[in-house]
Image (cartoon, rainbow, N blue to C red):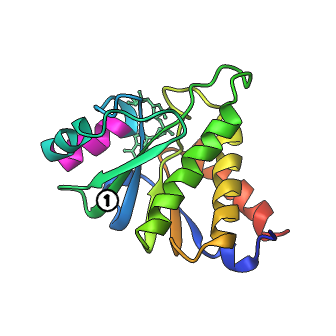
Amino acid sequence: MPVTGNVINRMELFKGDITKLHVDAIVNAANNTLLGGGGVDGAIHRAAGPGLLQECRELNGCATGEAKYTRAYNLPAEYVIHTVGPVWHGGIKNETHLLTLCYTNSLEIAHQLKLNSITFPAISTGAYRFPVYKAAAIAVNSTARFLSAHAFPQRVIFACFDDETITLYQDIMMLFGNT
Ligand code: AR6
């Protein structure tokens, strides 16, 4: 399916803390337990409050590449979509496919819930050590493909926590805009 100019207009970048965004859904880069951790997962649980952990306990964890959702409690969002990225092992353990699944399965939930806006952190690029430029390309490519075929979500925001990450996303999105 061709990626149209309309699709690039539905993707945005934000630099900073994902927990501050007023969107319909925030995606969490969680681990298989879904019971919290460090990085963006820790920030989301701290900002959401204890209700989030309580609801997560009922989900019985999540396989790598899959996604499950909860309410967002004290966050300025409606839902948290929890997905589990792959740990980077040098590219020999299906990491590209698994990271693609994180994006498409999270977007599928947003589509099912008919959400207008969803924001992703750079899944797997922190504690899970996925190279940022590869992860950014996967994020933008898989999202563009999904948006080409679906009306919801209408807007996707990539939340980048540091300068290196936002620069890489900018470069990749510029390439997209020019093709
Ligand atoms: N807002 C936006 N991005 C953030 C924030 C924030 N508040 N905090 C960190 N990042 P990581 P992973 C960025 O390690 O690699 C957890 O312990 C960060 O700079 O949060 O998928 C889980 O429980 C990086 O670019 O997630 C798992 O055990 C990106 O978010 C494990 O870490 C992802 O870094 C998951 O590792």
Using the image as rendered, state which of residue 137 and residue 111 is in the foreground.
111
Is residue 38 depicted above or below 148 in this figure?
above
- Residue in the image at 57% along x and 77% along y: 151
- Residue in the image at 73% along x and 25% along y: 91
Using the image as rendered, state which of residue 10 and residue 79 is in the foreground.
79
Query: How far across and down, in percent of the image, does residue 150 sit?
Result: 61, 73
Prevalent SS, magenta region: helix
Query: How far across and down, in percent of the image, does residue 10 sit?
Result: 59, 73
Residue 79 lies within the magenta run: no
Is 28 left, or right, of 147 in this rendering?
Answer: left
Locate residue 26: give its quadrant: bottom left
- Give, as a single range, the part of the protein colored magenta: 41-49
Quadrant location, ligand no. 1: top left
Residue 44 lies within the magenta run: yes
Locate residue 175: give its quadrant: bottom right
Is residue 113 depicted above or below 82 in this figure?
below
Instruction: Tell me the quadrant of the picture where the N terminus can be found.
Output: bottom right
